Image (cartoon, rainbow, N blue to C red):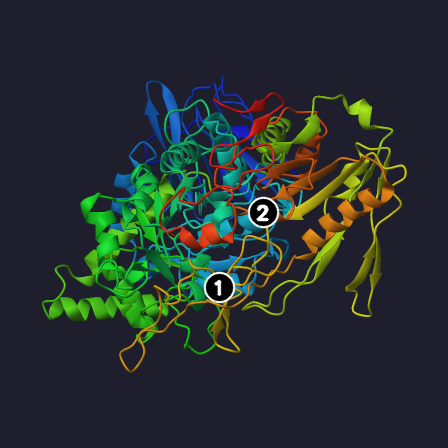
Amino acid sequence: MRTTTTAGKLDGRAARVRGAAALAGLALVATAGCTAGTPDEENASDAFTTREVTDGTTTFVVVDNPGDGPTLSYGADSAVELLTEEVDGQEYAFKDMNANGTLDTWEDWRESAQDRAAALSEELTIEQIAGLMLFSSHERSQADGLTDAQKEYLTDSHLRNVLHAGPSDVEATVTWANEMQAYAESLASADEPYVPVNFASDPRSTAGSGGYNAEGADISRWPSNLGLAATFDVEHMDNFAEMSSAEYRALGITTALSPQIDLATEPRWLRVGGTFGEDVDQNTELAAAYVDGYQSTTGQEGWGPESVNAMIKHWAGDGPGEGGREAHTDAGKYGVYPGGNFDAHTEAFLGSLDSAAVMSAYSIALDGAGEPLFGERVGTAYDDTRMNLLREENGYQGVVVTDWGVTTGVNDEGAVIATGWGAEDLTKEQRHYEILKTGHDMFGGNNDVAPVLAAHELWQADFEAGTNDVDADTRFRESGARILTMFFNPGLYENAYLDLDESTEILASDDKVEAGYAAQLDSVVLLKNDGETVTAADAEAWKDKTVYIPRNFNTGFASSFGPGEYTEGAGIDLEVAEQYFGTVVTDEAVMDADDKVTSYTAPDLSDVDLVLVGMDSPDNGGTFSNIGHDVENDTWYPLSLQYRPYTADGANVRQTSISGDLLADGTRQNRSYFGNTSKIANESDLDAFERAVAAVEASGKDIPVVTVLKATNPIVPAEFEAASDAIVVGFGTSDQALLEVVLGLHEPQGRLPVQFPKDMDTVEAQQEDVAKDMTPYTDAAGNAYDYGFGLSYGGPITD
């Protein structure tokens, strides 16, 4: 990377320096006493300084203002000019982004984000505002650089909100982001004012292998949301929010599609692992801490260079899917409230309405009788009542975004992600219009501006017919102002470019990695510790020991994107285990011609000192697997929290479902799975456990068996607890953190953020919308695996 520096002081409010000429021009008028700023130093002089920076692909100019003035940046070849103003003897720079020689309200970084956004919204074209309403589909290949398809949606659809769904590769991301920002800057004209790119991301910091975008080592690693809840220590959340938001900014990400604060009242629901658990108060506290940490900057009040827009989701709660089915597919499009507990699901949202944005839920809400909870049999994006609760009754003025795919219906040609529940009979243009009518501002996963502009025409036609109170331009500019606030909040209009050296220094820095790992350690839950199997020890005590770690496989599930993926391997990373043990042994596998396991043989345990069995949560499938519905046979089957086949024929299983589509004859579809059997892709995990126990018995030795659960949901422990000497649970933690707790290198401090049920019968008896209403499992020591339970070396944790 190359950085050059000059200093300058210009006379006159409208004095201007243009593009690459800035460097030479400023050099000629350099003032004595001006010093060159660096990326890591505050400019202590009385005048701004400039630097030219390149990432090897894009070159841009950085302007360091004196004192507390913000850092500015613009493309070296852009038409951006600088305006200056002297305040108390200090010369500050501002960007003239529309080349009119005047410091407009939206260009003045001293004005509030809201005032700037409102002013700029009046200057943008309706086509530009319609483009602002788009949130792109997933962009996964940053290493490819700026593509023609991306240029097309930036140019033709005026799209400016881009979802970064690739790995946290620093160099690839920085280069791609700068290239896209420079291209967006080049599109500005007198007729179409400049709008930078707002990059967004789903959570990407989870340590466990199942974490979103978990590959790569360019970012610090933390427990999942459920793991952070398991620490029962909000300080870890404070650290996470502060540090991960700084890393996001170093990747150019200015909006987080998080936190997910759905209340985990249905234990089978696929997305429990992304929540803060099932306790309302804990959920509310952690959500508020997350939002506050993301939307602030260390050492400053309010927004700053480390701040990221938070987007709480999914309003008004998407957790109570009937039987645990999930609303990305038709199988789970209904959320049910048999306990009449809707209000509990909104509490965390109402406690975090200072978030810049809210994402609405997919599901259709039904009461216990299967009737619409609010009068309309539609998903949240189309539901006036749920949206009025947010906008009108609680006065939310931030941005509201749909979840991805809600403007697509399952019957649309070429539909893949299609979640327009209840609006399938509308055209795509009508869906956009109806969503705007409910108070939404943005459409998740949409790259094409045409249906948004069509919605503008529909709105105007209804206005002229007397149906709408305001004209279409006014309604669009209202959304435009809200959306632009998300650009001004984090300072995108001042400094949209990234210095690769700075980003590399910030990402995965020692302090962040250490804090993330400390949170991982504190999140691990010790459930069982027979005979003090887990006790304080020195790492050296294990260096000459031998451990047996059995292997397992997962058959995978087919999804909307293709066939299931078959995976096979040791239950705990063998390379990580080798860092602690003298010898690591595992099973011998026999494979068929398709590289699938036909049999495993356990090793000789004569010299083995410890058995560690790694087990994932029972795998019912993914969000796009239509789980719970056998589409080919049009039958329904239960989701399960146990590994062996579960046949749902107990007294508590509903023989008539709450949810179901309305049929042509006026009856309602029955989605009951009574009498049918679960489908678990990783039943092999329990085979591995039983193989290990049998091998220990065959050895004639007293070898401790420790079960290491990598949990995303509650689990029924009855299948393995009795034969386990110890059980530890990690929620999105690394194998290293799990091992260090098992080996006594860190005293366990975690506690369960959700109940672990006694059996599937109590799971069937509980109500999807009610928390803590299962009978928890009780182990041989008499400990109930209830919410808040966990052991330390001394026994149950009581504080």
> Is residue 628 at least partly visible in the picture?
yes
Tell me the crowding category of disc 1: few under 14, some 14 to 19, or many 20 or more residues within 10 angstroms, Cα based. some
* Location of residue 203 in the rendering, given as x and y in whole percent from the top left corner: 51, 45
At 50% across and 54% down in the image, what residue appears? 270
Cβ–Cβ below 8 Å for labels 2 and 1?
A: no
At 82% across and 68% down in the image, what residue appears? 592
Local SS, label 1: loop
Q: Residue furthest bottom?
A: 665
Local SS, label 2: loop
Pick the residue in front: 430 or 755: 755
Instruction: Identify which amino acid the numbered label 2 is placed on.
Output: Gly
* Location of residue 80 in the rendering, given as x and y in whole percent from the top left corner: 42, 45
At 50% across and 40% down in the image, what residue appears? 225
Instruction: Identify which amino acid the numbered label 1 is placed on.
Output: Asp
> Is residue 570 at least partly visible in the picture?
no
At 29% across and 56% down in the image, what residue appears? 440
Instruction: Report whether 191 appears left or right of 299.
Output: left
Instruction: Report whether 6 appears left or right of 587.
Output: left
Q: Which residue is mark 2?
A: 211
Q: Which residue is mark 1?
A: 649
Tell me the crowding category of disc 2: few under 14, some 14 to 19, or many 20 or more residues within 10 angstroms, Cα based. many
Q: Is residue 349 above or below residue 626?
A: above
Pick the residue in front: 522 or 643: 643
Q: Is residue 432 above or below residue 768?
A: below
